[in-house]
Amino acid sequence: MANSSVSGACDPDGPLLLPATQFDWEAPVPDNFRSIPVLDYNLVLSGVPEERALFMKQLGVVAKKIGFAYLINAPVDQQVVDRLIELLPQLFGLPKEKKLAICATKSPHFMGYLQTGHEVTVGKVDHREQFEFGPDRECKYQEGQPEYLKLKGPNQWPSEHDLPTFKDTVSKYIDQVSSASFKFIEDIAESIGMPRTAFDKYFDDAAREGCRIKILHYPAMDNFAEGEDDQGVGAHKDNWLTFLLQASNDVSGLEIQNNAGEWFVAPPMPNSFVVNFGIGIERITHGAVIATTHRARNPGKGQPNRFSVALFQEAAYTKSMEPWTDEERNLAGCAKTTEISAGTTYGRVSDALPHSMPFDNVGEATLWNRIRSHPDIGYNHYSADFVKRVLEEGPNSHPLAAEIAAKVGARGYAQASRPSTPTPNVTPSESPAVSPSAHTHTSSPASIASGGTTLHSESNKSVGMFPQSKISLLEEKLALLSCGDEPAVRVYAVAEPGRNAALVVEKGEIEKDIIAKNRMLANKLEVSQSAYKGMTANSPLMQGLDRASKNSYDPVTNPRGIINLGTAENRVMASAVADKRFDPSMLQYGCFYGSLRLRTAIAKTLNKHFRALTPLTESNVTVLAGCSAAISAMFSSLCNPGDTVLIATPYYGGFDWDVCLSSGASLIKVHTAAPDFALSPELFEAAYAAASVAPRVLLITNPQNPQGTTISAATLLALLEWAAEKQLHVVVDEIYGLSVYAETPCEFVSVLALPVPDPARTHVVWGPSKDFCLNGLRVGACVSFNDNLQSAMRSIAILSNIAVNTDNLFARLLEDSEWVARFIDENCGVLRALYERTTVALDRIGVRYLKSNSGFFIWMDLSPWLTAHPKASAAESEMMLWEEFLEHGVYLAPGCAFSAPVPGYFRLGFAVEWEILEVALTRMSEVLST
Ligand SMILES: O=C(O)CCC(=O)C(=O)O
Ligand SMILES: [Fe+2]
């Protein structure tokens, strides 16, 4: 019996195994193809029409002739994939009792662990153990409804303690690969000449929530019993669309059968997915897309174990899998390529969904298949009648099939064939007993994410558009909002006719409710409310940085990557700073609020370059690990929880964290007006008068971010006078104070250079992140003549104190005052040149922007381009445009990240090499010209 599955395996004298990357796309695909080609998704992501067309042509060949391909550069975060791969040996290495504690036999949703011997393909036991996970969701099944609704439900996770980050990693993996697969199914339609929406009708919201994955472990044959074969999974076709991750780079196992009936190996290819189509797609496309038979073999003796992760996209359970009608196909000129006969194509076997669908819908067919593979789970959780029908259908080699057949009274079952390999050793304790009592159905509460037309009634308000693939995430958030006795906020995620879902919130005292809910949720997590706010905040600045750094542009190695113009970093002058080296001897604690040496160096530098009216000494400076820490220490020292801080919009969104999180204070946003966003005491006076809690601090940034402009000395003085009258503290963040490239000197005036009316209440924050390209160094200085404030800040500096080496390094840099002066000069020259070149390009595109003189931003008004999305609100359109830029490889910071008073503004950071900036500007103009 050994190796019986190998018959028909690769003929060593057969055609050469062509390296996948050299696949000859022009030649007709021979029936006896011996490799599968590589599809590069960058051809789609590049946005270049010719490349897209090439991809579609190649995918068409794959769809019609091969059924399998490697897909590289899929829009999936490689770090998530790598993390998952890293976790797999630990997952399967969990003690047996921990794995069995989340055994799938306990789950009506077939979620969880299945040990070897519990799956059978074409009459033989598969030698693989597996975990099945899906999007975490409530089960919507209720008594009396079709049983297949029970298939979708919550996961059984290994505990966070046993496997830290596993749940998060798998959830992200499912989310991202599902999204990629939903794009890909549209690509498949396009590749065979159908509209991209041709498959849409086979999906519903539940299907689009995300796909299931099977995490698979194929043990090497070392411990196999004598005579056992190497069937990891027997020959089969998949159901619909599979994204397979071959997670062990050094061991093959997947084998594919070509159209001549021969088998060949598809070796692992790092950083790729193997995609393949199932018989569902084959059926509805009338064979225009083929489903190809494949199998997996266990690694031989002495080889490493093999891991893989299969993500199975499924059609909607509620739909029937009716093939495309003739009209649908004729419309797109899609020829009827192959007549599909039941069960077989090209003489290949199929162990999946039958081609002729004797079922009302996909859900029933899926449940049928699942129970056929796992009659024990069927018996534990589904009606005896359904299990009986499945078992009566034909032979079933599951180790418990005979026992279950007897219990449900399946007729004729005695004739069923037994496994052709030794029955795996299944002890009762490993295989949770088939208990008749488990037949009682537990009805789960209805999900809050109900669909339906009532949601669009007058009383509802749409508050956001989200890709459908994100609905499950929304639901999670909404479930949080709505938990408690009575849902205080009724929120629904519903599909819109297009490709987005709308989040609908019923009118009501939403703000108040959310605050109350947040308090409750913070209590539940036993964290403070401000920490909870931080934990749940999700700024585009963070998201953009994350996405841009994970797929960062490089002209040689990643020319299609994202160019980051959104993050406030001066990268253009970084190399000029890099030759200032660290002193490695500084390994002991230093002064927690900055060494005397560093504080002195900072004081001297600011005295000189900010032209301080009253010279600073080291006693006026407290240093922390970055300006966020400095601002946080300053506001924690100035404010009590509940205090308020006046701030003009647009402002650097990070203040939401820096100012509020530790202090418990909140921001009162004072809206300025486009196009110049000017500040005035009157503006603040109005907000002051309207505030229910008297403000305690006025926070100003100068030079301004995101505007890239300076505040005139006259305006500053007027603001300081007004604040002094009100006894407000004024904090001026001057972090861009040395990056002033204005044509006329003195366009920037530091508050330290002014005769301030209330010196004890006037404070400055400065650090080298921006002016010296040292974001990563983490140095931030609180500058103030107020001794009490200094001691308060120094007392909490230990919570985020500067590293000694950093302290030393930066002190040495500043002490080289000639170098500092030269650097500032050179930096400003470079910034000026880049500003000019960038604005010339923007003028050419026709983009309006605020004229800047400092920092390294251009605050662009892209509102004329928002009208491209008539159905969405302006704020939604801003995010859509943002997304479009990202998809075209440019990250710009959207105005909402700065609480911009009007939608449609974007911040462009131009402190990058001109060659790169130029590429980014071209990409921008491409987006704006479509
Ligand atoms: O693990 C593999 O390589 C193949 C898995 C597979 O084909 C399946 O589970 O459907
Ligand atoms: Fe498969």
Image (cartoon, grey):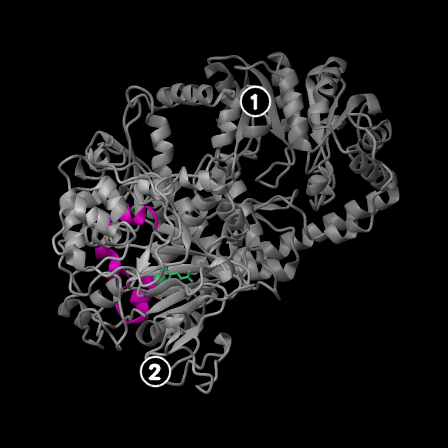
Mark 2 residue type = Asp
Is 148 placed above or below 628 here? below
Is 136 placed above or below 595 here? below
200 part of magenta stretch: yes
30 vs 700, left or right, is left
| Quadrant location, the C terminus | bottom left
Q: Which residue is mark 2?
A: 31
**Picture residue at 24% right of the left edge, 35% below the top:** 438
709 part of magenta stretch: no
**Picture residue at 62% right of the left edge, 51% below the top:** 910
Q: Position of residue 217 (x, y in %)?
A: 46, 54
216 vs 397, left or right, is right
| Quadrant location, the N terminus | bottom left
**Whether residue 699 is visible:** yes
Q: Which residue is mark 1?
A: 681
**Picture residue at 17% right of the left edge, 65% below the top:** 323
In front here: 624 or 613? Answer: 624
Q: Residues within 10 Å of mark 2 (few under 14, many from 20)?
A: some
